[in-house]
Amino acid sequence: MTELIPLIVIGVIVLLVVLWVAGLYNGLIRAKNTVDESWADIDTELRRRYDLIPNLIETVKGYATHEKEVLERVIQARNQAAANHGSVASQAADENALVGGLRQLFALAESYPDLKANQNFMQLQGELANTEDRLQRSRRFYNANVRDLNNRLEVFPSNIVAQMFGFRGAEYFEIDDPAVREAPTVKF
């Protein structure tokens, strides 16, 4: 019977280590899934923005027919951003271009008082501003989850478990140009 005591102690120690590793692994999986879920929230808001832009363009076209270059730039930026399913950094770059185009579009609207007074334009502009606010909240939520995951991947002892199972860090969804850090707005 005394020969079994060391085996039981070793068995308990091994069981505790296995449970500890499983707990760390499950925590990493939860953090990764939270990052994926929060990216899906951003994707939903981006799709909403992409759906609003063609209606906005059509409204502006009726008033600003000779401003075709700006309209085409916004359409091209929207199509490029909507088609991008690459890395977070690549999507952020396309979003920067799209927000810049929208700023030009709203600046263009300043030159057309009838357009600024158009009910459809005002409603679309309000929807877009609301979407930008929701997108900003989703972006902050996503980046906080990325931070939490990346911290788990870098701190001891979870970094050992992460390396054993091949976990990778996630990229922040950042806007590089400080000029496009705010939602596009138009002053009436």
Image (tube, rainbow, N blue to C red):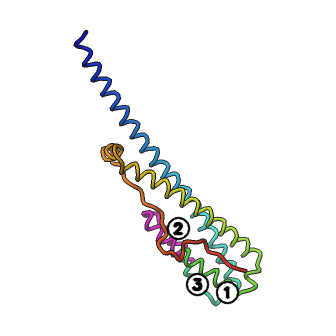
Residue 128 sits above or below residue 7 on the image: below
Image mark for residue 118: none
SS label for mark 2: helix
Of 152 and 166, the residue lying toward us: 152
How far apart are the alpha carbons under marks 3 and 1?
10 Å
How far apart are the alpha carbons under marks 2 and 1?
25 Å
Of 116 and 181, the residue lying toward us: 181
Residue depicted at 37% across the width and 34% down the height: 20
How far apart are the alpha carbons under marks 2 and 3?
18 Å
Measured from the top left, where is residue 163 in percent x and y?
Answer: 31, 47
How packed is label 1: few (under 14 Cα within 10 Å), some, or many (20 or more)?
A: some
How packed is label 3: few (under 14 Cα within 10 Å), some, or many (20 or more)?
A: some
In this rendering, the count of numbered labels is: 3
Measured from the top left, where is residue 17 in percent x and y?
Answer: 33, 32
Q: Earlier in the sequence, mark 2 or mark 3?
A: 3
Of 46 and 30, the residue lying toward us: 30
Residue depicted at 56% across the width and 56% down the height: 41
Tell me: 89 left or right of 41: left
**For mark 1, what is the residue?**
64
Q: Are marks 2 and 3 in contact (CB under 8 Å)?
A: no
Start and end of the magenta stretch? 74-97
In the orientation shown, which residue stands out farthest toward the bottom? 66
Residue 83 sits above or below residue 24 on the image: below
In the orientation shown, which residue stands out farthest toward the left? 3
Q: Is residue 82 magenta?
A: yes
Amino acid identity at mark 3? Val
